[in-house]
């Protein structure tokens, strides 16, 4: 159980040996919306569209939907859309 001890010293709690032994099968980790498991500031890091849609068009639509929202995830979505479009002034 050295792995759980090493994890604990780094601030990671591993619930038992079975969880640690199964970790190599993990292909995706989803963190909570508040970002408390990361740096506390949500950000868009990757986008995977499941339908045939142009990524630029997707971000234009999503930014238009989120630009006036007060939801904690709206701001990082709109910021990413601005960067994606290369337009600092106009997100939509």
Image: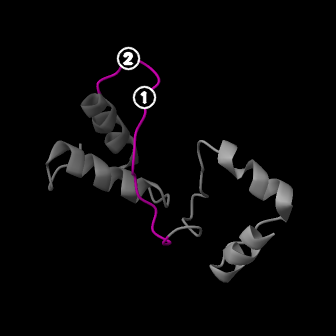
- Which residue sits at x=61%, y=58%? 32
**Residue 88 locus on image (x, y percent):** 15, 55
Residues 73 and 2: in front is 2
Left or right: residue 74 compared with residue 7: left
**Residue 24 locus on image (x, y percent):** 67, 47
**Residue 27 locus on image (x, y percent):** 60, 41
Q: Which residue is mark 2?
A: 52
Q: Which residue is mark 1?
A: 49
Magenta stretch contains residue 51? yes
Residue 91 seen in the current view: no
Main secondary structure along the magenta-highlighted residues: loop
Question: Decide: marks 1, 2 in contact (CB < 8 A)?
Answer: yes
**Residue 66 locus on image (x, y percent):** 39, 47
Magenta stretch contains residue 22? no
Which residues are drawn in magenta?
39-54
Residue 32 seen in the current view: yes
In the rendered image, the vertical position of residue 20 relative to residue 58, given as above or below: below
- Which residue sits at x=46%, y=62%? 42
Left or right: residue 8 compared with residue 40: right
Left or right: residue 19 compared with residue 65: right
Q: Whole-Å distance between the Cαs marked 1 and 2?
A: 7 Å
- Which residue sits at x=28%, y=46%? 81
Q: The residue tagged with tag 1: helix, strand or loop? A: loop
């Amino acid at each position: 159980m050295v792995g759980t001890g090493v994890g604990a010293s780094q601030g990671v709690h591993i619930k038992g040996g079975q969880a640690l032994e199964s970790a190599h099968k993990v292909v995706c980790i989803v963190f909570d919306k508040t970002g408390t498991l990361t740096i506390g500031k949500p950000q868009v890091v990757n986008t995977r569209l499941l339908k045939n849609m142009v990524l630029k068009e997707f971000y234009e639509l999503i930014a238009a939907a989120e630009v006036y929202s007060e939801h904690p995830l709206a701001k990082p979505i709109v910021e990413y859309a601005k960067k994606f479009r290369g337009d600092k002034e106009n997100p939509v």
